[in-house]
Amino acid sequence: MNLGNDRVLWLLFVVPVVLLPAYIWCFWQKAKALKILACNEMLKKINVSVSLKKQIFKALLLIAGFISIVIALTEPKWNPQAQRIKRQGRDVCILLDTSRSMLAEDIRPNRLERSKIAIRDLLETLRGDRIAIVTFAGNSTVKCPLTQDYAFVRMALADISTQSSSRGGTMIGDCLRKATEEVFDKQSREYKDIILITDGEDHDSFPVQAAEKAAADGIRIIAIGLGDEDQGCRIPIAGPNGERTFLKYNGQEVWSKVDGDMLRELVYATDGGKYLSVEPGTTLDLGQIYDDLIASAQKRQLESTTMLKYDDKFQIFVALGLVLIICEVFVSERKKI
């Protein structure tokens, strides 16, 4: 037998801890009350038609019904059957900007948190594709290699913050080169996508040349620029005493603007590249972007696995539990006369 949800088994502790003591207490209280109301001779006449064994039997029926329902909640399954599953998909690497400018709040709650929310939503949409995450600021870090284990990707995503990179700045080119060289394999020149999420302020890392190198390896780049290209937004930080202030450089407040021109040049260097602007007041929907640009693209065979498929049998225990509870209603406490 295979249990799909064995966590509910702890409910079985309710039987010895709650139900049995409760029934014992009720029987004891009932006997105690009767002794107060009448003497022993009178009780023998009053209880002549009442069967203690049947009362106990009715209690056991309810307990057995409860146990059966708990077993049903564990989603029991048996009769395993081997099933071969073929998976197809693309390799998708998300490059996530974690520089301090991603704390700008022109996109709520801020650019970085909105990006993480969008990535979590994307994981619900993926259809067998392998996914990786690389964070970057002044340097780049592979937070999650290519995998189909989306639960592991969620764990890696939860730990990402502006502290994920040890150096400040924004080196998009270096991040593209790391993804090209360390994330994607060299076995195929197809089925590879980079989703670059950034505010697009690069610090002389030659991103266009890096994009051209990625294109030579068959990688397509989808760049998403967060923020406004004209006005920009200030970057909130905590002051020395914990008060809210804004990042300054040479005594002037820093306004983070999207370098849309550079991002457009970058994506146009790759075959089928796409630039998408997410301005204040608009929504970053990676699920829709995936459906429009990636899900419909050509896929390759990623792996074939053999899995055991079980038949669900929880219905048996649900029916048994209901029958036991209904039987308890129709069982009389009286003796047959």
Image: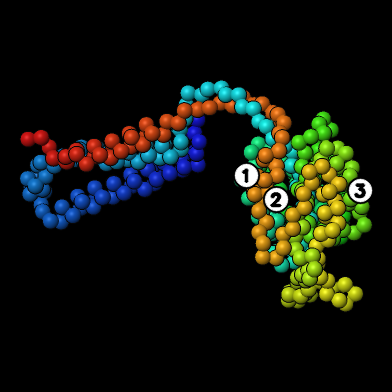
Check disc 3 and report the residue beneath it: 209
Drawn side of residue 270 relative to residue 50, left or right: right
Q: Position of residue 145 (x, y in %)?
A: 76, 41
Q: In the rendered view, would you say 310 is above or below 231?
A: above
Q: Residues within 10 Å of mark 3 (few under 14, many from 20)?
A: some
Name the quadrant of the C terminus: top left
> What amino acid is at disc 2?
Leu
Q: Are marks 2 and 3 in contact (CB under 8 Å)?
A: no
Residue at the image position 76 percent from the left and 75 percent from the top: 245
Drawn side of residue 197 relative to residue 4, left or right: right
Residues 209 and 315: in front is 209
Q: Are marks 2 and 1 in contact (CB under 8 Å)?
A: no
Q: Tag on residue 259?
A: none
> What amino acid is at disc 3?
Gln
Q: How far, Cα to Cα, is label 1 from label 3?
A: 32 Å
Check disc 1 and report the residue beneath it: 125
User: Judging from the image, what secondary structure is the residue with disc 2 in?
Assistant: helix
Q: Position of residue 91 (x, y in %)?
A: 74, 38
Check disc 2 and report the residue beneath it: 157
